[in-house]
Image: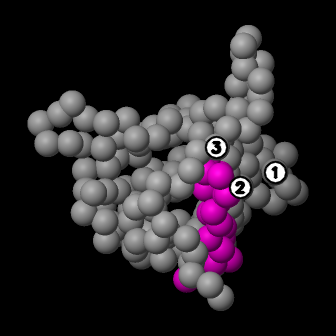
Amino acid sequence: MAETLSPADRQEIGDLVSRYCWALDTGDVDSFVDCYCHDGTLVWDAFDVPMEWHGSEQLRHFAQFLADQPSTAGRQHHVTNLLVEADGDGARGKAFVAVALRQGDGPHLLNVMGWYEDSYAREDGSWKLARRVIRDWSGPVLANIRGQTGERESRPLPPPLAGLLPPKA
């Protein structure tokens, strides 16, 4: 059980987070799926009902659905302030995420402002995402800020995202 991560481990995990963004934003479905463990999980916990994709087939559905949407062309994930620490034989991390969407000559739209809560594991000799939870920058994470209740905030799932729901097994 590792108590700390080596600089090489930290760099590899940082590169993994960057590969995830590049794959998702360029429609590279295979590379997106390869960022996850074979039984990896993605949870989007921002809407009324959190959505979850488990395993390569459902993760492929998620990435392919977004790649098939003309409205996602020009999207860029910006991930910063990545904090990673050892967690048993794996690692856990959190980072800020903002998703910008290019709109013609601008102004461009800030589509998402949130954070990732990640678990990483070694699989096939590389660090992979075992679990990623996408959260809005609201609710419990802001509980220490005056005037904030810390209650989970959610919004209705936008109709264009209804096809993102994982396929039934």
Disc 2 to disc 1, C-alpha distance: 9 Å
Q: Nearer the viewer, residue 116 or 168?
A: 168
Q: Which residue is mark 1?
A: 87
Q: Quadrant of the C terminus?
A: bottom right
Residue 158: x percent and y percent?
47, 54
Q: Residue at x 49, y 66 (%)?
A: 162
Q: What range is drawn magenta here? A: 39-57
- Determine the secondary structure under disc 1: strand
Direction bottom: furthest residue: 169
Disc 3 to disc 2, C-alpha distance: 23 Å
Residue 24: quarter of image: bottom left
CB contact under 8 Å: marks 2 and 1: yes
CB contact under 8 Å: marks 3 and 2: no
Looking at the rendered structure, the kind of residue marked 2 is Ser
Residue 150: x percent and y percent?
77, 28
Q: Is residue 29 above or below residue 158?
A: below
Q: Which residue is mark 2?
A: 119
